[in-house]
Amino acid sequence: MESISIDSQYFCTSKFLFILFILLIFSACSTSNPPESSSSPSQLVTASVVDDDDKTGIELRHEEAAVPIDGTVQSTSATAIFQPTVAEDINPAADIVEVNLEAKVSLVEFSSDVLSEVYTYNGTIPGPLIKTKKEDMLIVNFTNNLPEPTTIHWHGLQLPADMDGSSVAQNPIQPGASFRYQFKVNDPALFWYHPHVRSNEQVEKGLAGTLLVADEDDKANLRSIPEHILMLDDILLDNNGQVQPAFVGSIEDILLEKINGREGNVFLVNGQQRPTIQAEIGQPLRLRMVNIANTRFMDVSIPGHELIRIGGDGGLLRTAQTGLDHVTLVSGERADIIVTPQGEAGTLLPVHWNDVERGWHSITIDNGQVKMGHDPLDGKRASVVLFQIELIPSQSLPRELNLPSRLNEIKPIRTRNATVTTLKFGHSAPTATGEISFTINGKKFSELTSADAPDARIDETQIWDLVNMTGGDHPFHLHGFFFQVLETIKKDEAGNIIEVIPPPPLENKDMVNLPRRPGPKGSTTTVRIAIDFDHGERKSSDILANGGVPAIVNADVQAGVKGHSGGWLFHCHILEHADGGMMSFVEIWK
């Protein structure tokens, strides 16, 4: 009996070990080879300093470094990774999107063992993506937990004047205070949001996010194309890994930063330095980009690949622009492009930032005299890899991109009998004490009164002649309304027309670059735009704005109090120029 008992025990033990062995093999097979397009682990946001030695490894991590950051988790789609955080919609209604936003100070780790102080929306850089549909009501419950006043400007949106968040539309939200932004979104496009108080400092410190208004109709049949939302940025770090304050260093350094604007030494794409995304070979890929940098123009190219531009500031173009080898975004501008990656599986396609000539100045001070010249390296700096596209095998045959001949119905603005307004963009001579003023029609923003502002009536059409009298480019931004570019006129110092550039393909814009003058002082470049001050989907009372800063009354939606805006801002979107005075406003009257 004992021997039988031993044999039985041996048999049971062997059977148990055999079953355990089979289970271990099965477990290994199921975990060692995940599907190539499955979800990837959470990642920390990273950034690397770009310097002369091309050193890398300065890592940018959120303060909750041990916790996965929402939005950095890679999607189950092979082509949808490192997307921004998506703001949580806390309202159950199908036609209302309600989110909470908090501006606060956060600590991030730019380099090992160095904690740097930044400003964030909801603790992330960049701030969360707010996703809505056309005609949704958007409610943003905003709390300011910064140590200074701030606002939120909804860049590009056609919204009520008292919700615009500009320095002439709303009194700043004080530390510890809250404000409820509430408005309907009517234009399907990619927009972005940022502060309009000390914006050159607050945006540089991290305050920016995107707002996507989706078009459920999808008449252009674009929904099937994988897409990325890409926030292109740079940030300036000092030797201690901290965000460098504005206008520090020698007088030459200060003047250079004021006249050229502040460029960073770290390139970021959605808060990461030189990330890699995946794309299927031969399958179209949609890249929806916004340039949130203070100053830097983002000229983007993918060597050996055609770029097709299908949209911009105001959404889809009327017709696609094909055959492009690069796309340039000035500060604040958006571009919607499609590329079809080609190559061998495993290839890394570099997506380049390229320098563009835009009137970069040099400064020298000799015996107390400031001399301003043209930097010989303007437009000649080496290209930098913004991010990479890793090619993976496609699960289907190469897809031919068949875009409709008409992407969007855009009506040209009729300009017959339109009022013409001339706006001259200039600056004072720099001084040996580091001072320089930026002006529109000879006045900086702090000097303006209601009497200085151009006027418009509801439903009036105007032509604005935007005259650049300076040796540098100025990206122009208008709040609250789209415009269309009519032509660009270059004149010599005697006032003779030397070149007329016809309009680009028709699109609705809120940003346009004003190229530098073509010659010495006295020559000018004029960009002529058409604006329809139509209330459109808004109530006519929503676009009324007049009286300047003294007339501001903050809205209180929950108390039923409608605010009053002193005007609609327009300004140079090189933020150092805007905060230096190159900003004004238009008043809208009945």
Image (tube, rainbow, N blue to C red):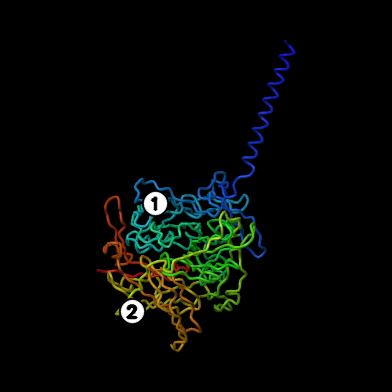
Instruction: From the viewer's perspective, tell me whether residue 236 is left or right of residue 545.
Output: right
Q: Residue at x 58, y 74 (%)?
A: 379
- Reading the image, the residue beneath label 2 is 420
Q: Quadrant of the C terminus?
A: bottom left
Total numbered badges shown on the rendered structure: 2
Where residue 326 sits, quadrant-wise, is: bottom right
* Furthest residue in direction left, as rendered: 590
SS label for mark 2: strand
The image shows residue 85 at horizontal and vertical percentages of: 48, 51
- Residue type pointed to by label 2: Val
Q: Residue furthest top?
A: 1
Which of disc 2 and disc 1 is earlier in sequence?
Answer: 1
Mark 1 or 2: the one toward you: 2
Q: Residue at x 60, y 60 (%)?
A: 388
The numbered dot on residue 142 is 1
Compared with 270, 412 (above or below) is below
Numbered disc 1: secondary structure: strand
Residue flagged by tag 1: what amino acid is it?
Phe
Percent across and percent down for residue 338 are: 51, 64
Q: Nearer the viewer, residue 8 or 72?
A: 8
Residue 428's place in the image compared with 231, above or below, is below
- The image quarter containing residue 389 is bottom right
Which residue appears farthest toward the front when viewing the image?
397
| Residue 216 disc label | none
Judged left or right of residue 242, residue 543 is left
Vertical position of residue 471 compared to residue 574: above or below? below
Give the CA distance from mark 1 to mark 2. 39 Å
Q: Nearer the viewer, residue 137 or 7?
A: 7
Quadrant showing the N terminus: top right
Label 1 Cα neighbours within 10 Å, binned few <14 / some 14-19 / many ≥20: many
